Image: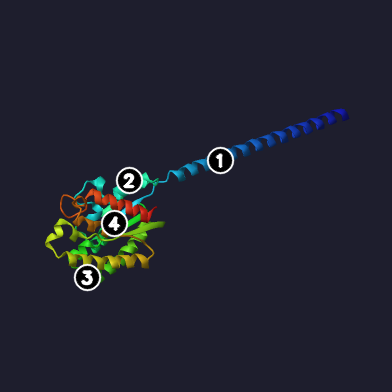
């Protein structure tokens, strides 16, 4: 009877040892599997970071919508191409702009637009129609403050904002019948406000005005409407904007 009891006790002991070994083996395999999955996920996350596409919101007037040129020649679209050629990938841009818009027209347009996401990069090119319609500079300054509030709500937390100077339309063939010196001086006044606004708020600023003034001697820089920039000029803008904003 005692021998039978010892045999049963020894059998239970063997079962216990085998169970512990099996559990240990399972734990090792599970741990290895978890480590492998974590490694795969890390690689996937790394690949996703390498394939990031940035988003662009371009706000403005006829100079942003590209009056007088094909869609692919607008400066935002040429900017995306320039960026891609330099190793920076943007998704297609969203443009909120119309010919003839003054600063307060743009404010109204933003308020009436639907936005489903925030943007990595936001550009602002506005003011030429304020100048053309003899609107007060102080009114323009107040509108810039309002626009910045809206832009800050549209950009991502670490998003970047670019202020673009107003081109000098007096240098175009259309400006021939106007006082070009007066136009140039007024454009400078508005641009000084834009530059001061950018500096005060820590925003990027790029001057495309000097490029536009070359049009008086370089007709290929003007579109067929004799007023707005051609695709050639917009490409120069795009390259300079990339250098100032991204490069």
Q: Residue at point 14% right, 65% down? A: 179
Query: Where is residue 173 shown, x and y percent of the image?
Result: 15, 56
Q: Nearer the viewer, mark 3 or mark 1?
A: 3
Spatial separation of the CA atoms under disc 3 and disc 1: 61 Å
Mark 2 or mark 1: name the one nearer the start of the chain.
Answer: 1
Number of residue marks = 4
Residue holding disc 2: 81
Mark 2 and mark 1 residues within 8 Å of each other at the beta carbon: no
Mark 3 and mark 2 residues within 8 Å of each other at the beta carbon: no
Q: Residue furthest front?
A: 217
Look at the numbered disc 2 and give the secondary structure of its residue. Answer: helix
Mark 3 and mark 1 residues within 8 Å of each other at the beta carbon: no
User: In which quadrant will I find the N terminus?
Assistant: top right
Spatial separation of the CA atoms under disc 4 and disc 3: 21 Å
Q: Quadrant of residue 61?
A: bottom left
Residue holding disc 3: 136
Q: Which mark is residue 59?
A: 4
Mark 1 or mark 4: name the one nearer the start of the chain.
Answer: 1
Does residue 25 appear anywhere in the picture? yes
Q: Nearer the viewer, mark 3 or mark 2?
A: 2
Graded by Cα atoms within 10 Å as few (under 14), some (14 to 19) or many (20 or more), the crowding at tag 3 reads: few
Graded by Cα atoms within 10 Å as few (under 14), some (14 to 19) or many (20 or more), the crowding at tag 4 reads: many
Look at the numbered disc 4 and give the secondary structure of its residue. Answer: strand
Q: Residue furthest left?
A: 177
Q: Nearer the viewer, mark 2 or mark 4?
A: 2
Q: Residue at point 28% right, 56% down? A: 59
Spatial separation of the CA atoms under disc 2 and disc 1: 35 Å
Q: Nearer the viewer, mark 1 or mark 4?
A: 4
Q: Nearer the viewer, mark 2 or mark 1?
A: 2
């Amino acid at each position: 009877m005692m021998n039978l009891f010892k045999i049963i006790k020894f059998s239970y002991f063997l079962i216990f040892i085998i169970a512990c070994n099996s559990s240990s083996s399972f734990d090792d395999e599970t741990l290895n599997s978890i480590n492998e999955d974590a490694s795969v996920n890390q690689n996937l996350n790394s690949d996703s970071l390498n394939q990031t596409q940035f988003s662009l919101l371009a706000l403005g007037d006829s100079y942003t919508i590209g009056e007088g040129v094909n869609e692919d020649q607008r400066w935002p679209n040429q900017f995306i191409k320039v960026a891609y050629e330099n190793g920076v990938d943007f998704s297609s841009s969203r443009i909120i702009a119309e010919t003839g818009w003054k600063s307060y027209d743009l404010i109204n347009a933003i308020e009436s637009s639907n936005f489903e996401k925030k943007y990595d990069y936001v550009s602002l090119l506005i003011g030429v129609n304020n100048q053309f319609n003899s609107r007060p500079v102080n009114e323009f300054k107040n509108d810039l403050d309002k626009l910045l509030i809206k832009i800050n709500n549209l950009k991502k937390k670490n998003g970047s904002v670019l202020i673009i100077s107003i081109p000098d339309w007096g240098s175009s063939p259309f400006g021939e019948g106007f006082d070009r010196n007066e136009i140039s001086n007024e454009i400078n006044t508005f641009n000084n406000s834009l530059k001061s606004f950018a500096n005060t708020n820590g925003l990027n600023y790029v001057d495309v005005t000097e490029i536009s003034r070359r049009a008086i001697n370089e007709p290929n820089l003007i579109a067929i409407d004799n007023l707005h920039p051609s695709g050639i000029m917009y490409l120069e803008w795009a390259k300079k904007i990339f250098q100032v904003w991204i490069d």
